[in-house]
Image (cartoon, grey):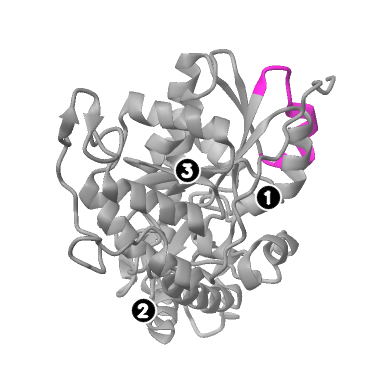
Amino acid sequence: MTIPEHPIETPPRAPSPVHGFGTLAVHAGSPHDPVTGAVIESISLSTTFAQTSVGKPVGLYEYSRSSNPNRDNFEKAIAALEHARYALAFSSGSATTATVLQSLAAGSHVVSVSDVYGGTHRYFTKVALSHNVQVTFSPSLEIDIAELIRPETKLIWIETPSNPTLSLVDIRKVASVAHQHGILVVVDNTFLSPYVQNPLDHGADIVVHSVTKYINGHSDVVMGCAAFNSPELNDRLTFLQNAIGAVPSAFDCWLAHRGLKTLHLRAREATKNATSIAEALQSSPHVIAVNYPGLPSHPQYAVTLKQHRDGMGGGMLSFRVRGGHEAAERFCQNTKIFTLAESLGGIESLVEVPGAMTHAGIPREQREAAGVFDDLVRVSCGIEDEVDLKADVLQALEKAVVGPKIKNGVANGNGNGHA
């Protein structure tokens, strides 16, 4: 395939932050109220705003679907933390994905990593296809990208780490090839958050998040966002944000902005907990494999060191338990601190079985090709005490694998202790 005459040029980046992440998290998009002096912004619930004459609003706002003070402030904060010039908030992570895909012309082609969130896979295969946007999935994007690009390819979709096998992609490597062909690169940064990774710094054109997860961090808001540096992208996506109308409420923006202010503290604690648990699982004879980017044994650990703040692995991990799907279920049902539930990134720790829950809608053959086996357990580490979480995982693992064998009379004292 010939390279187009006009490959993508990287748009001007946002100015380098003057302050550190924690200072930006607390203060970006958080002006003091000029009338009352309130340090924390009020919630602007009004859907419409007065005008002094026809077509001349009193201030910046006309109608809350188009813009709202709380949404504007939240978007400014996201832009600051993702080192972006612009950011837009949406009613969910899925709405963010849909809006980005809606920006493509009919007949466009997208290349995506195979191991993506189940909702993203559903949109790509069930909804985008109906709009004549085709998606090709690749389990080895960095290797295959040049061969997968077609004349109609307009977008590369990356999850790094991926959901739920925590595979990594070298963003710069993929972006370098994509940009030669005039193709945009989108990175879903939900699993790490802006504190651990900033994809725009590594060549991505758009970074998206399910704000529901780490950014909000308290499991009480459903939201999404996208951040980028291109003025053209800002015009196009802002138009779609308003035209489609998949926008968050003022109250949700206020809650998510409040959650964002402690992101750095929560991400550090979650990473510490996940690292401890991953190391314990890796040493257990009851575990087949552990997927965690913070372990030196991770096959793409070099990418962790290159792209993640201080080589952090984040708060997410997954592992395969001996004993198949039944053992995976037993593990989740025997935890005492971890809650069996979908979602991730909150202050509380969660476990789930992706093959039967978040990724159940993906055909089994496709799931297993991406490494999502029936015995895979996904773990979202919260901010509880490390020693308590580790003990909870180990006791549940013992009950899931060893307990059934003892009940069935397998344990006779002569075994080697391995399941």
| Disc assigned to residue 384 | 2
* Residue that mark 3 sits on: 226
Regarding residue 280, the answer to whether it shows in the image is: yes
- Above or below residue 104? Residue 247 is below
- Above or below residue 359? Residue 164 is below
Identify residue type, mark 1.
Answer: Val
Verify CB contact (< 8 Å) between mark 3 and mark 1. Answer: no
Between 186 and 27, the residue placed more toward the observer is: 27
Q: Secondary structure at mark 3?
A: strand
Outermost residue on the right side: it is 2
Nearest-to-viewer mark from 2 and 3: 3
Outermost residue on the front side: it is 53
Identify residue type, mark 2.
Answer: Glu
Q: CA distance from mark 3 to mark 1?
A: 19 Å
Residue at 64% x, 44% y: name it. 204
In the figure, residue 166 lies in which quadrant? bottom right
| For marks 1 and 2 on the same chain, the one whose residue lies earlier in the sequence | 1
Q: Quadrant of the N terminus?
A: top right
Q: Is residue 149 magenta?
A: yes
Q: Residue 400, percent across and down?
A: 41, 68
Q: Specify start and end residues of the magenta stretch as a single range.
A: 139-153
Residue at 39% x, 69% y: name it. 26
Regarding residue 222, the answer to whether it shows in the image is: no
